[in-house]
Amino acid sequence: MGSHKRLPYTGRVPTPTVPAQDHECRQCCSFCDRLVHPSGCIARNCPSLYVFDDEETGHRFMGCIHKVFRGEIDVAVFREQERTRHGFGGVKMTGTPLPQCRLSVERAYDGSGQAFDCVNPSFFDPPETLEVSFDLRDHL
Ligand code: SF4
Ligand code: SF4
């Protein structure tokens, strides 16, 4: 009876924790990023927003369980900035947004001429996973 030599297992193929979705475009000199606005998480009372008190610092932080944005935001800093004219603003989107997320696209550089002409207009469309009809250009 022939014997089969078992091949050794080759370790797991790493699965990305964040879906491969590109939230930045560098195809022209404008350099655009998709942002998510934590003010929207609060205004929409999103159940995915969590808050915790950090024992070490005594600060309260908030984050998104879906990691639509990565990292945690100091609630006191957020509140303080929300009182200013510009507000806290948006943070870089890192995950797949849900319909309740408040999104925008921000251009890093404003310029004129061909170098700043958009060659990727679909970047302003809502991410494919989002079944809502809105246009991120509204927020520019
Ligand atoms: S899912 Fe969207 S709205 Fe909800 S906490 Fe995360 S980023 Fe905010
Ligand atoms: S303006 Fe258009 S092409 Fe230029 S970086 Fe933004 S999305 Fe990309």
Image (cartoon, rainbow, N blue to C red):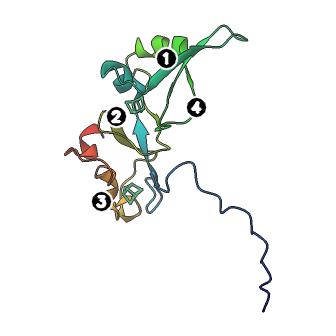
- Circle 4: is it few (<14), some (14-19), or many (20+) Cα within 10 Å? few
Q: Secondary structure at mark 1?
A: helix
Nearer-the-camera pick, 108 or 137: 137
Please report contact status of discs 2 and 1: CB closer than 8 Å, yes or no: no
- The residue identified by callout 1 is 78
- On the rendered image, what quadrant is the N terminus found in? bottom right
Contact between marks 3 and 4 (CB within 8 A): the answer is no
Disc 3 C-beta below 8 A from ligand 2: yes
Callout 2: CB less than 8 Å from ligand 1: yes
Q: Tell me the distance, in whole angstroms, between the alpha carbons under discs 4 and 1.
A: 14 Å
Nearest-to-viewer mark from 3 and 2: 2
- The secondary element bearing badge 2 is classed as loop
| CA–CA distance in space, label 3 to label 4 | 29 Å
Using residue 5 as the reference point, say whether residue 63 is left or right of it: left
Q: Quadrant of residue 59?
A: top right
Question: Is tag 4's residue or tag 1's residue first in the polypeptide sequence?
Answer: 4
Lower position in the chain sequence, tag 3 or tag 2:
2
In the image, what residue type sits under mark 2?
A: Cys
- Residue 98's tag is none
**Label 3: which secondary element:** helix
Q: Amino acid at mark 3?
A: Pro
* Residue designated by label 3: 121
Q: Mark 4 highlights which residue?
A: 71
The Cα–Cα distance between marks 1 and 3, rounded to whole angstroms, is 31 Å
Which residue does the image show at 32% across and 55% down from the upper left?
A: 128
